[in-house]
Amino acid sequence: MTNRQIELALKRGRLQERIAGQRATLAVQTVPIIRALEKTDRAIVAGRTGVDYIKHHPGQVGTAIAVLAILRPKRVWRWGRRAFVAWGIWKKVRDRLDSAGLIGRRNAA
C-alpha cells in the first residue's frame, strides 16, 4: 500500500468512528421526540376510533345524547355549542392548510 492509500484508509476509519458517535448521540437525543409522537399517534388513533364508532352507531349515540338532554339540558346545550365552535374552527384550519398545500383531503365529498 502506498502512503496515500494508508492515509485515506485512516481518514475513512476516523470518519466512520465519527459517524457512529453521531448516530449514537442522535439516537439518544430523539428519544423524547419519539415518545411524544407515540402519544400523539395513540391520541389520533383514539380520536379516529371514536369517530368511526359514531359513524357506525348513530342510533346509539343519538339515544345517549337524547337521554343526556333530558337529564341535563343546560350541560348538553353548553357542550353542543362548544362542539359546534370547535367544528367550525377545525373546518377553517383544515381549509387553510389545504389551500396552502400542507395537507390533502382524503375524501373530496
Image (tube, rainbow, N blue to C red):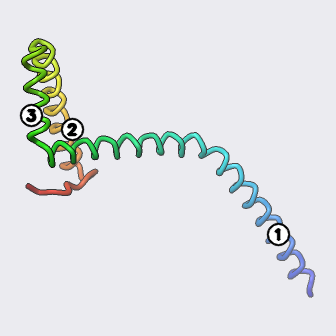
Residue drawn 41% across the image and 43% down it: 42
Q: Residues within 10 Å of mark 2 (few under 14, many from 20)?
A: few
Q: Quadrant of the N terminus?
A: bottom right
Tell me if residue 102 comes above or below residue 88 in the rendering.
below
Spatial CA distance of label 2 from label 3 is 27 Å
Tell me if residue 65 comes above or below residue 61 in the rendering.
above
Amino acid type assigned to the residue bearing label 2 in the image: Val
Is 7 positioned to the left or the right of 26 in the image? Answer: right
Residue beneath label 3, please?
A: 62
Residue drawn 50% across the image and 39% down it: 36
Amino acid type assigned to the residue bearing label 1 in the image: Gly
Residue beneath label 1, please?
A: 13
Query: Residue 64: percent from the left, percent from the top?
Result: 13, 29
Spatial CA distance of label 1 from label 2 is 51 Å
Spatial CA distance of label 3 from label 1 is 67 Å
Number of residue marks: 3
Q: Residues within 10 Å of mark 3 (few under 14, many from 20)?
A: few
Q: Which mark is residue 93?
A: 2
Q: Looking at the image, tell me whether mark 2 or mark 3 is earlier in sequence order.
A: 3
Query: Residue 39: percent from the left, percent from the top?
Result: 46, 40
Viewer-nearest of discs 1 and 2: 2
Using the image as rendered, state which of residue 42 and residue 86 is in the foreground: 42
Residue drawn 12% across the image and 23% down it: 80
Using the image as rendered, state which of residue 15 and residue 46 is in the foreground: 46
Q: Residues within 10 Å of mark 1 (few under 14, many from 20)?
A: few
Q: Which mark is residue 38?
A: none
Using the image as rendered, state which of residue 12 and residue 74 is in the foreground: 74
- The quarter holding residue 84 reads top left
Is 87 positioned to the left or the right of 40 in the image? Answer: left
Is 45 positioned to the left or the right of 84 in the image? Answer: right
| Mark 2 touches mark 3? (CB < 8 Å) | no
